[in-house]
């Protein structure tokens, strides 16, 4: 729940206006309301709005009205649409909510930051990315606790306004997440490895299983199910993530192809030892990671962005 005294310069009572009530936006709306925030949402589809209203939430198909209300109530606007729709939404924000603080949940950050700059909104924008989700889409797939104990990246790009940063971090904390600060390009390079590459590998693995025919698919159990889970995501969402992060994903993919080619050579020579020992050790490093809190950094103080980036690189988290 929101604790206004815990961070002196933050304002936990800031209302939330969510644009796009799919899996992520719908979950943000639910979580914000559960945390005691005043919150409302916009979705272009009347069916989704009817479902959200039927579930007791304040939702509308009227983007202009949602943004004018955000402007008058000094809300934090959350852009929760896929990358191809971001430009349209930013245009509407620039026109109808010119003074609100804005964040987003899009899975890539540098392209969003560039679009925000093109609309002249950088001064009051702080990028975000909740590292949570499922292979499902839409309002009905959302839950209030989707972000519980998840990591939520809050961008610390040059020029970030510290009060806006705290508003966005507070929303993430209210949603039950912990915050990892990262510069947008570093975020994109990191998620290429741990999110976008897994999508590519999952699609390839699913194809390999299907190529084995009904017998192979009939025998498939845990490792195939887990390894292909994200191939169940709507293809258009995967395209938006992967294509939008092309250069970083190509680097990660090239490195992985090198690993696979080396493994192939080793297997042809009769051994998988090198790959399995190195992979096992890498997995153990992931399992043993710890979340240490960020200490001694105050948003707005001299050098706070650099200190936040360093803390994020060490895997430290901003909590209450
Ligand atoms: P979703 O398909 O469940 O919801 C997308 C929402 O965007 C819907 O409300 C849809 O109506 C709206 N939308 C799509 N095109 C639009 C347009 N042209 N104009 C207005 N609204 C439009 O998708 P999601 O999983 O909630 O993804 C939303 C954002 O969250 C994406 O940018 C995605 O990268 C990001 N994200 C997704 C996940 C995940 O695991 N699914 C995790 C973190 C972040």
Image (cartoon, grey):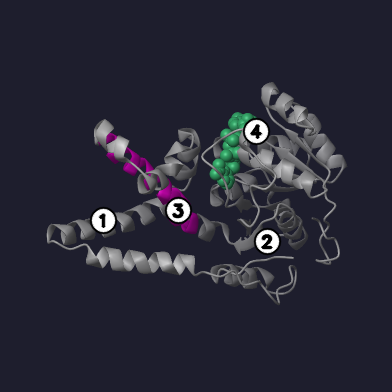
Answer with the quarter of the image where residue 151 lies.
bottom right
| Mark 1 surroundings within 10 Å by alpha-carbon count, few (fewer than 14), some (14 through 19), many (20 or more) | few
Q: Earlier in the sequence, mark 2 or mark 1?
A: 2
Q: Nearer the viewer, mark 1 or mark 4?
A: 4
Q: Secondary structure at mark 4?
A: helix
> How far apart are the alpha carbons under marks 4 and 2?
34 Å
Q: Residues within 10 Å of mark 4 (few under 14, many from 20)?
A: many
Tell me, yes or no, whether the two marked residues, 4 and 2, touch with CB atoms within 8 Å: no
Q: Is residue 172 left or right of residue 192?
A: right
* Among the 4 quarters of the image, the one containing residue 47: top right
Please name which of the two marks, 2 or 3, marks the residue nearer to the observer.
3
Q: Element at badge 2? A: loop
Residue placed furthest toward the left? 269
Q: Earlier in the sequence, mark 2 or mark 3?
A: 2
**What distance separates the C-alpha of mark 2 from that of mark 3?**
25 Å
Q: Earlier in the sequence, mark 1 or mark 3?
A: 3
Q: Which residue is mark 4?
A: 139
Point out which mark residue 159 bears: 2
Q: Residue 302: which quarter of the image?
A: bottom right
Image mark for residue 135: none
Chief secondary structure of the magenta portion: helix
Q: Residue at x 73, y 52 (%)?
A: 124
The magenta-colored residue range is 189-211
User: Mark 1 vs mark 4: which is more N-terminal?
Assistant: 4
Q: CA distance from mark 1 to mark 4?
A: 39 Å
Residue bearing mark 3: 192
């Amino acid at each position: 729940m929101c604790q206004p005294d815990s961070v002196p310069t933050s304002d936990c009572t800031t209302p939330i206006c969510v644009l796009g009530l799919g899996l992520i936006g719908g979950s943000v709306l639910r979580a914000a309301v559960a945390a005691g925030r005043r919150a409302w949402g916009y979705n272009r589809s009347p069916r989704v709005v009817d479902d959200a209203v039927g579930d007791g939430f304040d939702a509308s198909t009227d983007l202009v009205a949602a943004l004018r209300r955000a402007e008058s109530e000094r809300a934090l606007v959350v852009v929760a649409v896929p990358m191809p729709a971001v430009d349209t939404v930013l245009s509407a924000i620039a026109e109808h909510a010119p003074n609100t603080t804005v964040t987003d949940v899009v899975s890539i950050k540098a392209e969003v930051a560039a679009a925000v700059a093109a609309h002249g909104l950088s001064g009051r924008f702080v990028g975000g990315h909740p590292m949570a989700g499922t292979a499902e889409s839409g309002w009905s797939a959302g839950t209030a606790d989707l972000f519980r104990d998840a990591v939520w990246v809050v961008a610390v790009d040059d020029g970030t306004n510290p009060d806006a940063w705290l508003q966005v971090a507070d929303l993430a904390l209210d949603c039950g997440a912990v915050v990892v600060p990262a510069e947008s390009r570093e975020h994109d390079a990191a998620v290429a490895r741990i999110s976008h590459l897994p999508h590519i590998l999952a699609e390839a693995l699913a194809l390999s299983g299907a190529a084995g025919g009904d017998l192979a698919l009939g025998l498939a159990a845990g490792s195939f199910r887990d390894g292909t889970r994200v191939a169940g995501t709507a293809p258009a969402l995967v395209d938006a993530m992967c294509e939008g992060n092309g250069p970083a994903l190509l680097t990660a993919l090239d490195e992985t192809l090198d690993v696979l080619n080396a493994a192939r050579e080793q297997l042809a020579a009769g051994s998988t030892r090198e790959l399995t020992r190195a992979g096992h050790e890498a997995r153990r490093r992931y399992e043993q990671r710890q979340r240490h809190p960020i200490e001694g950094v105050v948003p707005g103080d001299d050098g706070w962005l650099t200190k936040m980036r360093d803390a994020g690189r060490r895997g430290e988290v901003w909590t209450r």
